[in-house]
Image (spheres, grey):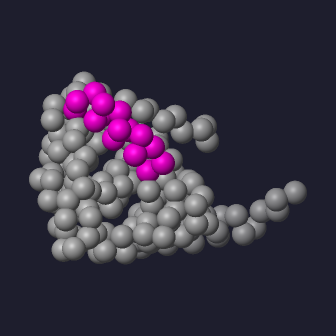
């Protein structure tokens, strides 16, 4: 498999889309990392390539996008995004407010739908719940601080063996049982 290419501009537009799609009180740092992670992994499962190609590192509270901080800073310098620290039950929480529209030309309709679906799923959970969900087989495949390979997304898909699958396996095994490999 070839190396995954990181598309920084697409990554920035995905961040801006999520910031414009989600109310600020529903989009903190933890949830933004997880939305991007799930969108990239789901896109990998559906298309054989991630949405943005950013590296995700295994951290204590789940996968984190390697370049999120610098991309947010770039978007802020460009005047397109505001990242604020707000009080959240006595703690500081980052929230994100889009101050300019995302560039729709960087994201296909299917990708926007995927981002919306992932955002809707993540927004309905607390940061703690979504962190627990992200501690899955793909996350377990890497050591703390290591990059989580995209191919581990295959471990996120449920595997169901059907009667047809079993019949095919038995038929194939029977056909090859009487042949010698050499």
Secondary structure that dominates the magenta span: helix
* Relative to 80, 34 lies left or right: right
Q: Is 152 situated left or right of 178 in this image?
A: left
Residue at 35% across, 50% down = 36
**Magenta span has 70?**
yes
Quadrant for residue 7, please give it.
top left
Q: Is residue 145 above or below residue 137?
A: above
Which residue is depicted at the point 19% across and 65% down?
87
* Horizontal and vertical percent position of residue 171: 57, 67
Q: Tell me, yes or no, if residue 121 can be seen here.
A: no
Q: Is residue 19 left or right of residue 71?
A: left
Residue at point 41%, 63% (across, down):
157
Q: Quadrant of the N terminus?
A: top right
The residue that appears at 42% across and 33% down in the rendered structure is 8
Closer to us: 132 or 168: 132
Magenta span of residues: 65-80
Please identify the quadrant where the C terminus is shown.
bottom right
Q: Position of residue 170 (x, y in %)?
A: 57, 72
Residue 120, image x, y percentages: 18, 58
| Side of 43 where 180 appears, left or right | right
């Amino acid at each position: 498999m070839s190396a995954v290419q990181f598309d920084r501009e697409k990554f920035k537009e995905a961040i801006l889309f999520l910031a414009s799609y989600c109310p600020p009180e529903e989009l903190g740092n933890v949830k933004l990392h997880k939305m991007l992670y799930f969108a990239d992994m789901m896109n990998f499962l559906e298309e054989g390539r991630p949405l943005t190609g950013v590296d995700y590192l295994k951290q204590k509270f789940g996968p984190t996008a390697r370049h999120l901080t610098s991309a947010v800073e770039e978007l802020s310098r460009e005047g397109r995004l505001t990242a604020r620290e707000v009080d959240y039950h006595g703690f500081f929480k980052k929230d994100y407010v889009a101050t300019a529209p995302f560039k729709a030309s960087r994201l296909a309709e299917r990708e926007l739908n995927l981002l919306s679906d992932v955002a809707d799923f993540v927004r309905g959970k607390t940061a703690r719940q979504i962190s627990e969900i992200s501690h899955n087989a793909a996350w377990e495949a890497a050591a703390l601080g290591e990059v989580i390979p995209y191919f581990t997304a295959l471990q996120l898909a449920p595997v169901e063996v059907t009667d047809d699958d079993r019949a095919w396996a038995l038929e194939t095994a029977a056909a090859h049982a009487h042949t010698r490999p050499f």
